[in-house]
Image: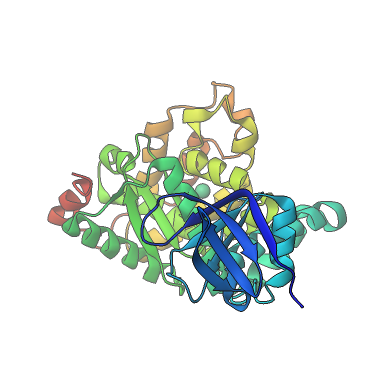
Amino acid sequence: MTSQTAVEANVVFYDGTSNRKRRVALRLGDGLDIVENGTVVATWPFADIRRADGPAQKLRLSSVSALPLARLEIGDAATIDDVISRCASLEVGRHGAPQTRRIVLWSLAAACSIVAVTVYGIPLLADRLAPLIPFKVEQWIGHSVDTQVRAIFGGKTCTAPAGQAAFVALVDKLKVAGEIETPLDPQVISVSFPNAFALPGGKVYVTDTLLQRARNVDEVAGVVAHELGHVKHRDNLRKIIQNGGSSFLVGLLFGDVMGGTAVIFATRSLIDSSYSREAERDADSFAGEVMHKLGRSPKPMGEFLLRITGAQANRGITILASHPLSEDRLADLSKLDRPNTGGELLSSAEWQALKAICK
Ligand SMILES: [Zn+2]
């Protein structure tokens, strides 16, 4: 037995051929009749109806037998309950969707953070969890974080082919020397402040402004090698597990490498959420090792950092920042100074192409 219900309230139909909103009524009988001005314009069998992504308070539906972009949007709570009770296959196919998986992952990370705080103490759990996360999962997380990065930066990736080829060549040399086995996805983005950072899943970013302010390849190479240190140690993943995502992200975007001088006062809590001093020192020593393997000195990297941040010791801000002082980093990297025995990491043509990647 099926009851017939006519519903007038608050239903919008997109027929899948245009983005025109059509105000319709629903009639729930053997199937779901979509009624416009008293005429049935479509009937969706209940078995074909699926939940589609939509705003939280509304139920958005698609039908596997309708046009792919056809949607119904129901706002009335009673109607939503009624429709849901009749559509047995509403959730079919959703659990395999990447979108859902991503949400599940982020929820999992958030839940882990809470457990971590209450039961284990955060760093311990993050340290234990990060190595267990498969690279595929890390890539999903990275993709999701990357979407947020693009939202913050407006998404301008620089893609001049010669510049990109030079950047990939440089990162490859550092990757091989650093014995990083997971794939990397290096990109230059156009942003008005100097920074470099790495996201989970091997995404490595350098800003155009950083490139412009570098005097030679070794300065950039050292900074990238530092980021590869975070990749190798999975610092970014660990930090995301600790912080649940967004505060980590903002801290990293503005804070890594350069110590967050751009936003230091406004965002103390965010700066605190960039990596620990220990992780930063480890990344610097990793950069030192990588540069040595390539026969290059890591000292230019230290000089570069100091030149960009300026002296930090007397500015008071360093008490807040979790990064080591640029002065201290230069001192440490200077201890690793060696004569260059390897060739330049990029030819001068490649270097010029890299610097022009955003033009
Ligand atoms: Zn760092």
Residue nearest the viewer, comparing 106 with 78: 78
Q: Pick out the residue farthest to the front.
A: 38
What is the quadrant of the N terminus in the image? bottom right
Residue nearest the viewer, comparing 84 with 246: 84
> Which residue is at a point 61% across and 73% down the rendered structure image?
31
In percent of width and height, residue 178 lies at: 43, 67
Taking 179 as reference, is 190 above or below it?
A: above
In percent of width and height, residue 132 lies at: 66, 73
In percent of width and height, residue 108 lies at: 71, 62
In percent of width and height, residue 49 lies at: 59, 71
Residue nearest the viewer, comparing 350 with 154: 154
> Which residue is at a point 69% across and 64% down the rendered structure image?
83
Taking 222 as reference, is 342 above or below it?
A: below
> Which residue is at a point 49% across and 38% down the rendered structure image?
254
Taking 209 as reference, is 16 above or below it?
A: below
Which picture quadrant has residue 307?
top left
Residue 274 visible in this rendered orientation of the protein: no
What is the quadrant of the C terminus in the image? top left
